[in-house]
Amino acid sequence: METLSLLWGGFCFGLMLQLAIGPVFLLVVHTSVMVGWVQTFPLIAAVALADAIYIALSSFGASAVLLRPKVQRYARIVGAVVLGVFGVNLLLSAFGMNVLPNVRLFQVGAEDGLFKQGLLLTLSNPLTLIFWGATLSGKVAREGWDTLGLILFGCGCVLSTLLFLTAVAGLGSLLRADFDPSWVAPLNGFVGASLIYFGLRMAFGKLMQASDLPE
């Protein structure tokens, strides 16, 4: 019962996080509308894998490195650039232009690059690692979990990512059935502008300090 309780706790916690609309959510919606539900699975798997990597790193205390202002600043700049390139490329595609025509990695919707896109987009956000580090250390301190408890909770979180984004992709594929080709450009423009916004917010947002994190 304790095993199921830890898995369920992680699942519910992860599900709450998924409800916040961010770059990954928008990318999954956009991709599923453009190429379909099944074709979006590599992207979803990559996002879940990136979450698992960050959770594993956080459990070993790697998030403490990003609390150093200089390191965090550089990491945020890199993340903002990644989001910016995705966003600008997608925004300009609405006008028939392409910033990096020969780089498939940044061609949103290119089926042969979806796994790499999901991995890059998710790992490029340094705040994710800081958040997981603070969350897991707080949970361990309060609940007295051992290594197995931490693993089970983390698995529940990753499972919520898989199921939630799969459901989002399913809804996107339903929209695809009635999607008019004339809407492609406005959709690309909207998602591209949103990614640019998230990139700017990452670049110029307040740096996180240890005092900002939950006890």
Image (cartoon, rainbow, N blue to C red):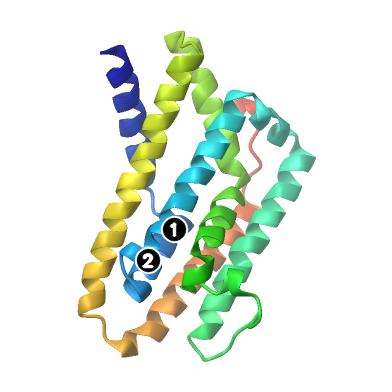
Q: Residues within 10 Å of mark 2 (few under 14, many from 20)?
A: some
**Where residue 111 appears, x then y in whole percent?**
46, 71
Give the residue type at disc 2.
Gln
Q: Which residue is mark 1?
A: 42
Quadrant of residue 200 within the rendered picture: bottom right
Circles 1 and 2, Cβ within 8 Å, touching? The answer is yes
Residue drawn at x 28%, y 20% as measured from the top left: 4
32 to the left or right of 83? left
Q: Toward the viewer: 154 or 19?
A: 154
The local secondary structure at tag 2 comes to: helix
22 to the left or right of 54? left
Q: Is residue 162 above or below residue 21?
A: above
Give the numbered dot on residue 39: 2
Residue drawn at x 59%, y 71% as measured from the top left: 106
Give the residue type at disc 1.
Pro
**Where residue 191 appears, x then y in whole percent?**
44, 71
Quadrant of residue 67 within the rendered picture: top right
**Where residue 137 appears, x then y in whole percent?**
54, 20
